[in-house]
Image (spheres, rainbow, N blue to C red):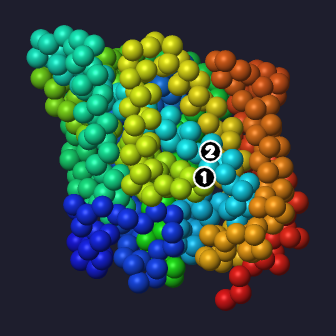
Amino acid sequence: MQEAFDRIPVAEAGPMVVEQRGIDLVPDTERWARPRDLFWMWAGALFNVEYVVYGALVMSFGLSFPQAVFLIVVGNLSFALLGLTSLQGPSAGTTTFTINRAPFGPLGSRLLSLFNWLTQVGFETEGLALIVLAAVALLQQGRVQATTTDKVIIIVAAALVQLILPLFGHGTILRVLRVLAVPFLILFALMAGLAVGKLNVHSVAHGATWPTMLAVLAVVISASGLGWTENGNDYSRYLPAHSSAAAIVGWVFAGAAVPSILLMVLGAAIYTFVPSATNPISGLPHAFPGWFLVPYLLVAIVQLFAINSLDLYSSGVTLQALGLRLSRIQAVVLDTTICALLTAYATFSNRFNTLLGDFVLFIIVWVAPWTAIYLVDWLLRGRRYDRAALHGGPGSRYWSRGGVHWPAIVAQLVGMAAALAGINTSVFEGPLARAAHGADFSIYLGLGVAAVVYWALARKQVRPEQVSI
């Protein structure tokens, strides 16, 4: 890894140098990264207490421990989708939602960019709110009861700290996450050692029915690979265009899936003797000795900052792809400010937490169809892009009709309708899910229907737009 950073231009890799590039093309001369660098970045981000909580959440649906382990392993295979949606960046040399102008058109892509920006901000707010709760819990360990003023100060301080890595940018994020991967792995090993002797594999005797298992599998897939597909190319764009596709997919999958599986299984195991483990601040620590609480909270805060950095960096470049005339630095500052305000609302309003939970459940309705369209379009284009046209105006290769490629818009809407028909959440159950006694088919319908519709509508138009070698 050090050799890779020795090859990085100072303006990109320096740990205290702010990255100036936004969604503009990364020149071939500045493609410093290697596929293995993505392993360390994803591992550093996903060795995270949030994934322990996701594992506990899986068990909360009434699954037996063996059922939970099976669904966790199967669901995390979806990180292969993250690997596949990291293959376009090296070819195009730009971010995900700039590349998205190819399938949707420069203007049509703005709607999907808006969806993604809202998604990233939602996750950023969730992470920052957990950081604030952890900080308040630390104060309580020191016998200090946080006042309203204290909480406001913590929110402002947390937002300023959260700003650092995304502000410095791509090279710094990869460097720091690589360093953090090791202590995070040590913490996981310690947590597993403290929990393994208390595992009760017979805590749920009979387990769940197949409709429930399908619903839980949808949750696992959403929390794992499919939930990150929008971010992949934001971090692979610094790889040379000739980088091995197999190496990219392999290193991304290993760096993301392995930590996620280990942590989710740990969370499921902890749930068998601490059912309150679905709460990372007030519940999960009960699984460990009292002396471990303060170190746990401190590391959890660092972990949450780390994973939030990926969301905040991606939301910043997504704002640029949305068409706002902001530099990447201005976009990051704006996102941080919005995130801090929403976190303040989350901290002082019980209703916000409910709204945020419902919001996260429905993210998959747009992500699944979009992922399918994005990948099918890439294949139809022969896995190559006209780099200049991705930033072009009327008359450019990807302008289509009035800046909108309607086959993609139609496929997205039809795919979203199919996903809604098969979804099962606490606030809405689609007719297909209801007919199947609560089984959730939203992901599979969203992916499959959108892929078929887009291929049928777009193949004759898109194939002639392929870039010749």
- Is 420 placed left or right of 114 in the picture? right
| Viewer-side residue, 262 vs 70 | 262
**Label 1 close to label 2 by CB (< 8 Å):** yes
Alpha-carbon neighbours of circle 2 within 10 Å: few (<14), some, or many (≥20)?
Answer: some
- Is 5 placed left or right of 105 in the picture? left
| Viewer-side residue, 410 vs 323 | 323
Residue 255 at x, y percent in the picture: 40, 56
Q: Distance of mark 1 from mark 2, alpha carbons? A: 7 Å
Question: Where is mark 2, residue-wise?
Answer: 114
Question: Where is mark 1, residue-wise?
Answer: 322
* Amino acid type, residue under disc 2 in the picture: Leu
Residue 109 at x, y percent in the picture: 69, 55
- Residue 418: quarter of image: top right
* Sequence-wise first label, 1 or 2: 2
**Residue under the image location 56 percent in, 31 percent down:** 360
**Residue under the image location 81 percent in, 66 percent down:** 400
Residue 286 at x, y percent in the picture: 27, 17
